[in-house]
Image (cartoon, grey):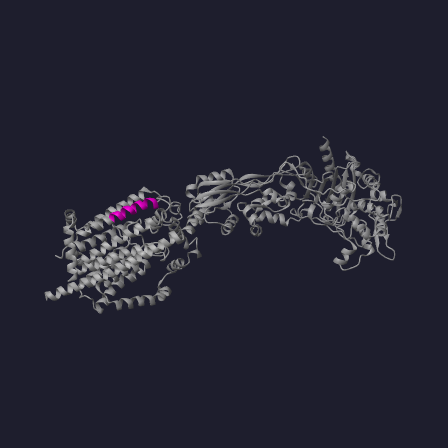
Amino acid sequence: MAGTDFSRTMSEASTQHGFNRSRAWFARFHVDLILLLLLLLLTASGLLLLYSASGQEWGMVKRQAIHFAIGFVGLIIAAQIPPRIYQRLAPWGYTAGLIALVGVLVAGVGAKGAQRWLDLPGLPRFQPSELVKLALPLTVAWYMAKRPMPPKFFDLVKAMAIIAIPTVMILKQPDLGTSILVSTSGLLVLFFAGMSWRLIFSMIALVGASLPVMWLYVMRDYQKQRVLTLLDPESDPLGAGWNIIQSKTAIGSGGIEGKGFMQGTQSQLEFLPESHTDFIIAVLAEELGLIGVLALLTLYFLIIMRCLYLSVRCETLFGRLLSGSLAVTFFIYVFVNIGMVSGILPVVGVPLPLVSYGGTSVVSLLAAFGMLMSMSTHSKK
Amino acid sequence: MWEHSFRDKSAERSLFRSRAITLAIIIFLMLCGLGWRMVYLQIDLHEKYRDLSENNRIQLKPIAPNRGLIYDRNGVLLAENVPSYSLTLVPERVKDMEQTISYLDKLIGVSERHKEQFDKRRKYRRRPFEPVVLRHKLSEEEIAKVMVNRTYLPGVDVEAQLVRHYPQGESFAHVLGYVARINQKEQNRLDQDPDKKRQYSATRFIGKLGIEKRYEADLHGQVGYQKVETNARGRILQVIEQTDPIPGDDITLHLDTRLQQLAEQQLKGRRGALVAIEIASGGILSLYSNPSYDPNLFVTGISHKDYSALRDNPDLPLFDRTRRGQYPPASPLKPVLGLGMIDAGTTNWDEEIDDQGWYQLPNDERIYRDWKRKGHGMVDMEDAIVESCDTYFYDVAVRTGVDTLSPFLSQFGFGRDMTLDVNNALRGLLPSREWKRRKNRSFWYAGDTVNLGIGQGFMLATPIQLATATAVLANRGKWVTPRLIYAHNDELDEIPHPDIEDIQLKDPKNWDKMFKAMSKVITGTHGTARRLLNNLQYPIAGKTGTAQVVGIKQDEEYDSEALKERLRDHALFIAFAPVKNPAIAVAVVVENGESAGKTAGPIAQAIINEYLGGAEG
């Protein structure tokens, strides 16, 4: 009862507002104007920051702008596709993702002892794990939406299996960071579906207990090294600790107001590694200071809150589960990246969403926002 | 049915909403956590990280000072700094080290030894992105070859640096010594003194021997600094501030290149040493040991082959005979001994002794032979000096006693290191009753005094000590400490010489009487160095000597033919000139030279003639 009231009052409130017409215009294209504006603001800031972080390299900024353009087109297209199509396609996408993952394990290419890329003739080189990032929450949402809520124990076990298969395969590449993110996006669906708190806490306890086992049997040496480096970066200041020491130095030296745009010595003089990709927030922190960082955190917070609000407004269970999961997954990216750069999480290769340089992640993230808009803007039938 | 379904839907919605709110709160808290972390880094730890980032950016780059030059007394350059081009690699920028080195090998040649040293240098005392030297002394052609192919050689560069060069080569090797790369031991010693550590922070070479070591502190100079902004790869983007290094002092030495080269020429093909001292100043005019070596080989690191050739040479070119060669002073000690005997009153200029060719201590069977089998007949002190009569000195020495002779010899610098700045010189050996008790734990026998009477037995002296004693003798007992240093940066060195008591004889006339006897060594009909008359340009006072290499057993004939060349006696000669007003004192040792009058004497005369001739002409 309360739920319907909530959505009704919201839609009534919006019709009473002055930008009724424009809102209607966007609604016809199934695009949420507020979210779109927030995303445009974020990507524009990202381009500006990239210009500084890349050492004033116009070529890189242009390529990233093209990525954004493709991503926004993808977003609009994804928003047009009605939820039921996604629902129908979900298991196929999942199956395709699994096949691609098998392909990676058999014939993947990559570097530093990890196979993550698939190089198929006629297709651009891509990471199948990116596909799974979208396909897995879709599939779990599809599966759970057909079940009564709150979910029964056996349904949860089956859903867990759906999550576990790609997770283990990504873990085998090996790519611990992505496998954790992928499984989390699936588990979030279960959380939104109403998995009981007792089960949630016992799962957390189980994960906690399995950590020592992971350390001993699953984690590779380089992964352990990253954790050890997090705990004591000074132990190897020129090797593994270099990145984290330099990024903390960049952040700390920025102070409250920063050294000024394009004036950061850590980033401009190349002391900061990966300054245009994973460590880009350190450039922001150095050049624009705490003020810049808090502004960015606020922007992310607004985007996530808007997404959660949209997910609550979805009419279908499938839509709610999927968009809730996508919103929180987006937050996890942000948290893991900033946590890693500021030295509270180990260094895993997670880019700062929509700010770090990189085509695949930009396009798939914006496409996910398109899906999210589709879920909340299409009426039930 | 519809009712039921509607209720379900609404329950689903409210369940979802409560979950979404829960997560929204968690997300908010976690973002606050990130914000708090940033506040901690950017406010609480701001100063620490600001300093760290400044240290990253700004580097204090030390600049090595130019080493002071070394000149001889006439301004001839003895040690200079010449630019040398080295091939350097920055390992961080070299993509494939093996491939790069093999390419360079094809281009300009890189030996196994170079690779070995390169690997060693890589591991030692190195900051990231600091270039490591692969090869020194590139020729113009090699530089061109590397520069042309630079695109294929990332991280490879040619670096210019100043390297010590000794233009006179072998002539001054022993006296100047050389500089070479600072080794680990020297580095550790420098590191112990914070000031030294700072001064040497950019210096690669240090004086290892001779003058280069003795005057290291003066020659080195003061380190300079450059405050530079660098990027992470160590490339200098701009110089913010610079303090220029202060070059080391230029040093002028008393050495005279003409005399030094003459000594080298004269001793050619021989093993020996020559020391010449200017009497008035105490300046060492020549300090030469033969054979010598090329000090330039050592500067940038001598090859194993070259080094073992020097080390294994039986003529010991690395051995500095002037400082480290200890020989029995033999007969050249007689003028000093004679003065001591007369001063002690145990003999006088008139006393004559009948020399039958041997001497025997009372109650002793042992026979001490004179070098002349049949003896010299009736000899007084002057004859004993001129003819180098051993029997005379055996007899008077025993009468005078070691307790008088030993302290007297000590006044002339025997058994002591008396030079101002000749580095690491040995003290020779001046025997005494006390010394023998301490060293051999036995008594001093009369026979020991017999041997001391002719400068043999236990007694040992270096060529420097012989020349010093000759200079003091020629200066009539007045001490002027022998020295190499003449001037620092064109300012004459007025180093107060150590307070050494001048030698006072009871009758100062004895000095000139001894000079007369010594001049008769050359001019007398029986003089042992009368051969020098042929070329006598200036009146010379001298004394010949032969030092036994092998002990000759009782009743055994000394037969030089039968002895191998290396077992022949060493020839010694001391001299000063002009006799009336001595200006130069010389001591020459020719190993296995046998007859001093034939070998060592003419060498000393050549030096004296050159010095006095040069001074007047």
Q: Determine whether, in the image, residue A258 is placed left or right of residue B586.
A: left
Relative to A14, does residue B294 appear above or below in the rendering? above
Q: Determine whether, in the image, residue A35 is placed left or right of residue B39.
A: left
Relative to B46, does residue A182 appear above or below in the rendering? below
Q: Main secondary structure of the magenta part?
A: helix
Q: Position of residue A239 (x, y in %)?
A: 42, 54
Q: Quadrant of residue A110?
A: bottom left
Q: Can residue B612 be found in the magenta stretch?
A: no
Q: Can residue A41 be found in the magenta stretch?
A: yes
Residue situated furthest top in the rendering: B617
State which region is magenta.
A39-53
Q: Position of residue B119 (x, y in %)?
A: 50, 51
- Of residue A122 and residue B421, the one placed in the foreground of this image is B421
Relative to B9, does residue B170 appear above or below in the rendering? above
Q: Is residue B221 visible?
A: yes
Q: Position of residue B287 (x, y in %)?
A: 69, 42
Q: Residue at x 65, y 40 (%)?
A: B171
- Of residue A95 and residue B551, the one placed in the foreground of this image is A95
- Of residue B543 and residue B16, the one placed in the foreground of this image is B16
Q: Quadrant of the N terminus of chain B?
A: bottom left
Q: Determine whether, in the image, residue A171 is placed left or right of residue B20.
A: right
* Count of all numbered marks drawn on residues in the image: 0
Q: Quadrant of residue B4?
A: bottom left
Q: Is residue B107 visible?
A: no
Q: Position of residue A202 (x, y in %)?
A: 29, 68
- Of residue B72 and residue B296, the one placed in the foreground of this image is B72
Q: Residue at x 36, y 53 (%)?
A: B39
Q: Quadrant of the C terminus of chain B?
A: top right
